[in-house]
Amino acid sequence: MRRRREDADKPRPSAYDKALGLLARREQSRRELRRKLDRGGYGGDEAEAALDRLGKQNYQDDERFAAMLLRNRAGQGYGPLRIRMELKTHGLADATIRRLLDEAEVDWQAHAAAQLRRHYGGKPAADRAEQGRRAQFLLRRGFAAATVRYVTHAEVDDADEES
């Protein structure tokens, strides 16, 4: 009971202070911050002014956020299609997403092959059904069909050379 009264006596932070506090924890997109401010009950004009101010001060930058998210998700083993879709949910423009993916120094084929090794170990697929399961795994992780085809066929070709 006492905590509620103390919380009620505390003045509510401004939209700027609330958004700055959220950004202090981690990078966030403008859309994400806007959604959180809306949920916090901040008015549209106050929230927009706060987000504009944060952008001008370079505390919030959608491109920096996107680059961080791309590095993070690639490090977690996701492919470019999955990363692209996640960035789109944050309201980034297609051209920006495309440029960031092109600038990312990621060998997606090597990345996909590493995911297969990590998930299935070093042994090749036993049969076509297993090869299909592995391909589906990579597709679900967001790798392009051409990359999946190359990696899963390369795995079969490597197994043929070993025998």
Image: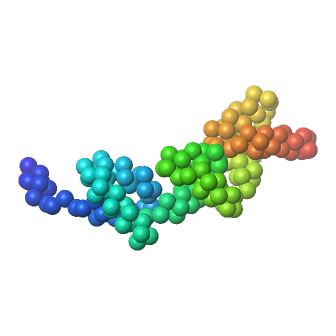
Q: Which residue is located at x 36 percent, y 67 percent?
A: 53
Left or right, residue 46 beside residue 157: left
Can you say whether 146 is above or below 47 in the image? Answer: above
State the scheme by which the image is colored.
rainbow
From the viewer's side, name the closer residue of 33 and 109: 33
Instruction: State the image coordinates of residue 97 (x, y, percent, origin top left).
Output: 60, 54
**Hey, which residue is sitting farthest top in the picture?**
129
From the viewer's side, name the closer residue of 143 and 99: 99
Quarter-of-image position of residue 105: bottom right
Q: Which residue is located at x 52 percent, y 64 percent?
A: 64
From the viewer's side, name the closer residue of 70 and 128: 70
Disc count in the image? Answer: 0
Q: Which residue is located at x 49 percent, y 60 percent?
A: 62
Instruction: State the image coordinates of residue 93 (x, y, percent, origin top left).
Output: 56, 52
Left or right, residue 48 beside residue 142: left
Instruction: State the image coordinates of residue 83 (x, y, percent, origin top left).
Output: 59, 49
Left or right, residue 2 beside residue 97: left
Quarter-of-image position of residue 119: top right
**Hey, which residue is sitting farthest front in the picture?**
45
Instruction: State the image coordinates of residue 161 (x, y, percent, origin top left).
Output: 91, 44
Can you say whether 45 is above or below 160 in the image? Answer: below
Q: Which residue is located at x 53 percent, y 61 percent?
A: 63
Can you say whether 54 is above or below 147 in the image? Answer: below
* Residue 19 appears in the figure: no
Quarter-of-image position of residue 29: bottom left
* Residue 112 appears in the figure: yes
Q: Quadrant of the C terminus?
A: top right
